[in-house]
């Protein structure tokens, strides 16, 4: 029990305030890591600092980052989703094939794809809350089923492993403008996915820190029994998180489709780990209840810098996965260390 | 005066296991009813029924004289029954102010701009805790960094602030030292003086006797006794709680074992 007078307490708070607040942020480790990676590639790769290179790096970051945001929220909520990588492909396949087979307008397929992708997310969340099985198992099941469905349906309908082109269909140009266009600012060419990414990060940060739902997300991840006992709708929150993942998978899927005009049905396998890695590097705890959306963006940015930096440094890209793995270990160790320091300083 | 909560001959079975049978108790405003029992006596089952986590299989459960069957903890909360569990229902990694309002967060603004009233949440948390004598340096610190007694007090302050009429406390002093236990009991008494009915679950007859008005003893899922404070002395309460004659037997056996070795 604190017996210190208010004046003394305030004095202590002033002296420690800034440093402690900074140390307490979940993103800190990842920001330090991002600065290190940035400096590293600035030195070893001459072309890394050119505007065109940076826009390429940002684009690579955004394709991972769009999915890392909802995956981070889900991890704060204490759950995993291993089906995200193939869910993106499923979403693209649905809009492509539905548009091609059933209608004349691409937008109809995009709408149907949104509904179906959200339904997959709902299925994940519903199965999780109903069966109480670990999310690892549930979404591993979804991952395998979707992988099979992607290949099976595409072959059944198109006869090959890729979809038919929808490039000449009505609405394709407007859909491409929304999901896969470029913006030129000066001589820098920016992909529209970067806007989607920043928008999602801002929205997720607002939801997490300033709304009731955000409070519930932290609570269901940090202690779901406690949350349930004080009246938090735990099941609805978790199902909502899975549907958020599905929504972003839909955005990514449409980008995948619109960047070309066909989709390969075997794509996406393995990407689920990149999203989780970005979230973890960004400060999300594997056990839930702690993390941030901004952190996931920094994690995705580290991913983008590494994957493209290796190319600009003219190294063999085979080394990329090794760097990614080493980075994951380092980031997790750094996070654990920072958190221990932050808690000890209280 | 009708009791705030009244259980009559309540039973609960899990399959063929009798967790609770024929237990009666009443809680009045401004009074503390203590439920005493050893491990496995059925205290947790009883608390879960009152809190709305489980439903009773037989007997009646009345709130304000109205017989009901609670479907969820939310329903119990809406009827003014707040339960403070042993794990305190707090999320350790979350700041104190977020924990204080968890599940009942105040908001401002409308539509998509509806947001947490953060300033009010912080200010209220600080003020309510100060009222209970806890002067926090920083309501932003994770609640897991508070001491056990402080966390217990935050949980009680939260229940009182949200207008609980009945406060159910599950072993609030179980993991605490002597001094901290005293502080917590002081707040329990303060809640009673504020007009709340309190159900205090404990296996410590000394703590119970300090604050309790009536005592219900549980033993192996059944009621072993029910007394008003005027009817029973601490010694007798302790004796009954510890198993009475069983304890005599035990001390007898232990004495023999010791003398046998010598």
Image (cartoon, rainbow, N blue to C red):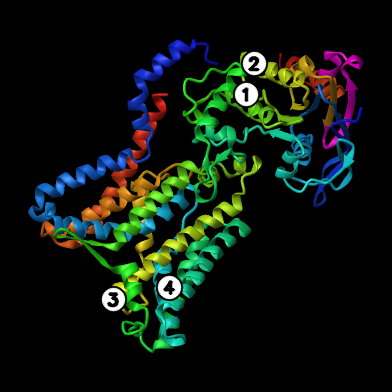
The answer to whether one can see residue B152 in this image is yes
Task: Name the chain letter of the residue that bears numbered label 2.
Answer: B
Disc 4 to disc 3: CB gap under 8 Å = no
Identify the element where label 2 is drawn: helix
Q: Quadrant of residue A173?
A: bottom left
Q: Which mark is residue B169?
A: none
Q: Residue at x 47, y 69 (%)?
A: A114
Magenta-colored span: B219-238
Kindly report the distance in space between the C-alpha atoms of the residues bearing marks 2 and 4.
Answer: 59 Å
Label 3, secondary structure: give it: loop
- Residue lying farthest left? A46
Badge 1 and badge 3 both on one subunit: no
Which x, y percent locates residue A285?
42, 44
Confirm whether the magenta stretch covers residue B226: yes
Q: Which labelled disc corresponds to residue B183? A: 2
Question: CA separation, marks 4 and 3?
Answer: 16 Å
Mark 3–mark 2 CB contact (< 8 Å) = no
Q: Dot 1, how many residues are within 10 Å of its Cα: few (below 14), some (14-19), or many (20+)?
A: many
Which residue does the image show at 89% across and 27% down from the upper left?
Answer: B225
Give the answer, above or below, for where B252 lies relative to A204: above
Q: Are marks 1 and 2 in contact (CB under 8 Å)?
A: yes
> Which numbered tag is attached to residue A260?
3
Q: How many marks?
A: 4
Same chain for the residues under marks 1 and 2 in the image: yes
Return the residue nearer the eye: A321 or B150: B150
* Label 1 or label 2, whichever comes before in sequence order: 1
Task: Point out the image quarter for the C terminus of chain B.
Answer: top right
Q: Position of residue B63 (x, y in %)?
A: 84, 37
- Decide: marks 4, 1 in contact (CB < 8 A)? no
Q: Residues within 10 Å of mark 4 (few under 14, many from 20)?
A: many
- Labels 4 and 3: the sequence-earlier one: 4
- The label shown at residue A90 is 4
């Amino acid at each position: 029990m604190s017996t210190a007078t208010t004046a003394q307490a305030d004095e202590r708070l002033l002296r420690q305030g800034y440093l402690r607040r900074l140390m307490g942020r979940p993103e800190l480790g990842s920001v330090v890591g991002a600065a290190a990676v940035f400096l590293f590639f600035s030195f070893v790769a001459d072309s890394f600092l050119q505007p065109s290179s940076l826009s390429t790096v940002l684009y690579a970051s955004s394709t991972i980052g769009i999915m890392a945001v909802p995956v981070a929220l889900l991890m704060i909520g204490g759950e995993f989703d291993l089906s995200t990588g193939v869910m993106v492909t499923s979403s693209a396949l649905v809009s492509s094939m539905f548009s091609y087979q059933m209608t004349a307008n691409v937008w109809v397929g995009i709408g149907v794809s949104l509904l179906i992708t959200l339904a997959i997310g709902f299925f994940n969340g519903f199965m999780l809350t109903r069966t109480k099985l670990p999310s690892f198992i549930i979404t591993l099941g979804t991952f395998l089923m979707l992988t099979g469905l992607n290949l099976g349906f595409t072959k059944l309908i198109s006869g090959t492993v890729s979809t038919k082109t929808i490039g000449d269909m009505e609405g394709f140009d407007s859909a491409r403008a929304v999901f896969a266009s470029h913006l030129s600012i000066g001589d820098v060419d920016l992909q529209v996915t970067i806007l989607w990414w920043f928008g999602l990060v801002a929205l997720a940060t607002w939801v997490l820190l300033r709304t009731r739902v955000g409070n519930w997300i932290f609570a269901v991840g940090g202690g779901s029994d406690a949350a349930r006992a004080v009246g938090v709708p735990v099941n609805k929150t978790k199902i909502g998180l899975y549907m958020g993942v599905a929504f972003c998978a839909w955005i990514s899927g449409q980008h995948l489709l619109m960047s070309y005009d066909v989709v390969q049905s075997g794509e996406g396998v393995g990407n689920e780990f990149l999203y989780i890695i970005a979230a973890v590097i960004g400060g999300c705890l594997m056990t839930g209840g702690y993390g941030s959306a901004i952190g996931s963006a920094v994690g995705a940015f580290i991913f983008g810098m590494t994957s493209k930096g290796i190319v600009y440094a003219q190294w063999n890209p085979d080394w990329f996965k090794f760097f990614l793995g080493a980075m994951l270990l380092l980031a997790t160790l750094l996070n654990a260390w920072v958190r221990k320091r932050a808690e000890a300083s209280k | 005066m009708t009791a705030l909560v009244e259980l009559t001959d309540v039973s609960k079975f899990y399959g063929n296991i009798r967790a609770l049978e024929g237990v009666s108790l009443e809680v009045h405003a401004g009074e503390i009813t203590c439920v005493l029992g050893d491990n496995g006596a059925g205290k947790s089952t009883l608390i879960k029924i009152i809190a709305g986590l489980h439903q009773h299989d037989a007997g009646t459960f009345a709130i304000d004289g109205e017989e009901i069957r609670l479907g969820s903890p939310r329903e119990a909360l809406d009827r003014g029954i707040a339960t403070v569990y042993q794990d305190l229902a707090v999320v350790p990694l979350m700041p104190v102010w977020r924990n204080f309002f968890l599940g009942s967060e105040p908001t401002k603004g409308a539509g998509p701009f509806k947001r947490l009233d953060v300033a009010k949440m912080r200010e209220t948390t600080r003020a309510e805790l100060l009222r209970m004598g806890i002067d926090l340096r920083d309501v932003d610190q994770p609640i897991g960094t508070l001491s056990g007694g402080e966390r217990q007090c935050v949980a009680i302050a939260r229940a009182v602030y949200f207008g609980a009429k009945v406060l159910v406390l599950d072993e609030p002093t179980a993991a605490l030292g002597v001094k901290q236990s005293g502080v917590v009991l002081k707040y329990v008494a303060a809640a009673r003086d504020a007009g709340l009915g309190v159900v205090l679950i404990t296996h410590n007859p000394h703590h119970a006797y300090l604050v309790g008005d009536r005592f219900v003893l549980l033993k192996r899922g059944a009621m072993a006794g029910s007394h008003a404070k005027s009817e029973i002395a601490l010694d007798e309460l302790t004796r009954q709680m510890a198993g009475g004659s069983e304890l005599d037997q035990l001390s007898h056996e232990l004495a023999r074992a010791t003398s046998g070795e010598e």
